[in-house]
Amino acid sequence: MDPLIGSTPRETLERVSASLGCSPTSAEVASYLDMHDKLRHLREKFLLPKIADLPTSDLSLVDGSKECIYLVGNSLGLQPKMARTYLEEELDKWAKMGVHGHTEGSRPWAWAENNIEELMANVVGAKAEEVALMNGLTVNLHLLMLSFYKPTAARHKILLENKAFPSDHYAVESQIRLRGFDPQQSMLLLSARPGEETLRTEDILQVIEEEGDSIAVVMFSGVQYYTGQLFNLAAITEAGHRKGCYVGFDCAHAAGNAELKLHDWGVDFACWCSYKVSRPQDLLFVVHAFNATTDSLTPRLTVSEFRCRRSGRSVCPRETQRRHPTSVSADVLSVFILTLLGWWGHALETRFKMSNTLELQPGVSGFRLSNQPILLVCPLQASLEVFNMTSMQALRRKSLLLTGYLEYLIQHHYAEDPAQPHKPHIRIITPSDPEQRGCQLSLSFSVPIRKVFQELEKRGVTCDMREPSVLRIAPVPLYNTFSDVHRFIEMLGSALAATGSQ
């Protein structure tokens, strides 16, 4: 029997502990789960830092020869072992071939990014032709909103969460100003209910229903960076489309973390960075959904709307489509929807003829402005090849139990106890519903956390702190183990004791 399948995390832990004759909090349970983890071989594909190599470690407290407890994959994934190999291959090619490296070898620099888009598409539930590798996160947010945010006097608002990641917030604010509108009037910021930390799906959908006629774009994150909440992207997309809005997502914290189905959900646009899939730099992917009428990679605009927009008349997105089901072709619409053009959006077959007569690639590939640095493509290829050794379904299955195990141990050891009011306790602000979270749990402490965070770092724990009061702990199913989680709980106890809080 596979202990990772078939029940809730709590039931699994209690069943395993009963069979072992020990407590669910025992290290024996973690060892058993690791032994039966069908994905445990993937850890060998990554480089785990040693405690002694971390600049924050105190070797008087811990054994520096051990691997660190790395629980910060939501900020930066570990380095795949093949990354160095691929980088050295290209450096060697550069040394030996010079400019010929643009078109020669297994990874020609002039189109190397095209070779890994199918691997990336599998991670986010898209088609290969719906994914393009380009730029950085904020740059692509701007490019996408330049194309999809077409405000009118009646429809000018952008809906986003109140505590959106700064990249999203600043980009939205500046795009609104760029179009001559006032962010105070056009930024529709959605906050959690009083006393709550996360947004309720019904509240998001209600705002879209009530305000949708004035909303041009719904632009949410996939996973909220601070709380770790995984939004219901399918429901938000459907609600936005029903009201005639474009719907897009910043999936930086969701790609490679949750099981996404961007194509099936009909998302208009999405972007995400690759540092969650084990790369230190910020290459970015964008996707926008296929047209349900023509099966082409275009936003849902119609011939009538295209003609009206071209003549300067404003038409509500999607309303025209309901009246006129005939859709404009992908090539024509790509020219229309793109605001900024670059050489790399030109068709590869004739790109180097340098004719200055644009042959725009259809769909998302037309958004490209320039080619990607090969030295950034290499580590990403190494990472995506590891993802290709399994599936997002299998990773998600392990993640549910891994994060559930962390939740169980936190609640067991650090739940608020009225009988011990002075004992430090931890509140998990990430939703308890597994369907509303990825691998991250955001922990809010009853004691000041900065000192606790520093004591954890001294003991070889790598996590991150977010102001004002949260530690984000993210066990990644690609390489984290159940023993990592158990060791973290032990180190957390030591850190609290060192601060005088235990």
Image (tube, rainbow, N blue to C red):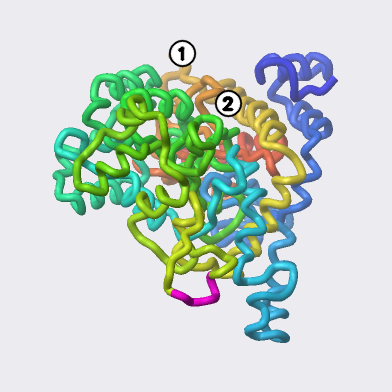
x 71%, y 20%: residue: 13
Secondary element at image label 1: loop
* Residue 419 tag number: 1
Given this view, does label 2 or label 1 mark the residue nearer the observer?
Answer: 2
Count of numbered tags = 2
x 16%, y 33%: residue: 154
Secondary element at image label 2: helix
Q: Where 206 sits versus 89, above or below?
A: above
- Magenta stretch, residue numbers: 351-355
Q: Where on the picture, by quarter, is residue 485? A: top right
Q: Where 301 sits versus 137, above or below?
A: above
x 41%, y 33%: residue: 326
Q: Is residue 120 left or right of residue 368?
A: right
Residue 323 lies, in percent from the top left, at 33, 25
Q: Magenta segment: does it hold 488? A: no
* Residue 407 tag number: 2
Q: 488 or 73: nearer the eye?
A: 73
Residue 349 lies, in percent from the top left, at 59, 66
Q: 442 or 292: nearer the eye?
A: 292
Of the numbered discs 2 and 1, the one sitting upstream in the chain is: 2
Residue 420 lies, in percent from the top left, at 46, 18
Residue type beneath disc 1: Ala
Q: Where 389 sits versus 194, above or below?
A: below
Q: 151 or 53: nearer the eye?
A: 151
Residue 123 lies, in percent from the top left, at 62, 42
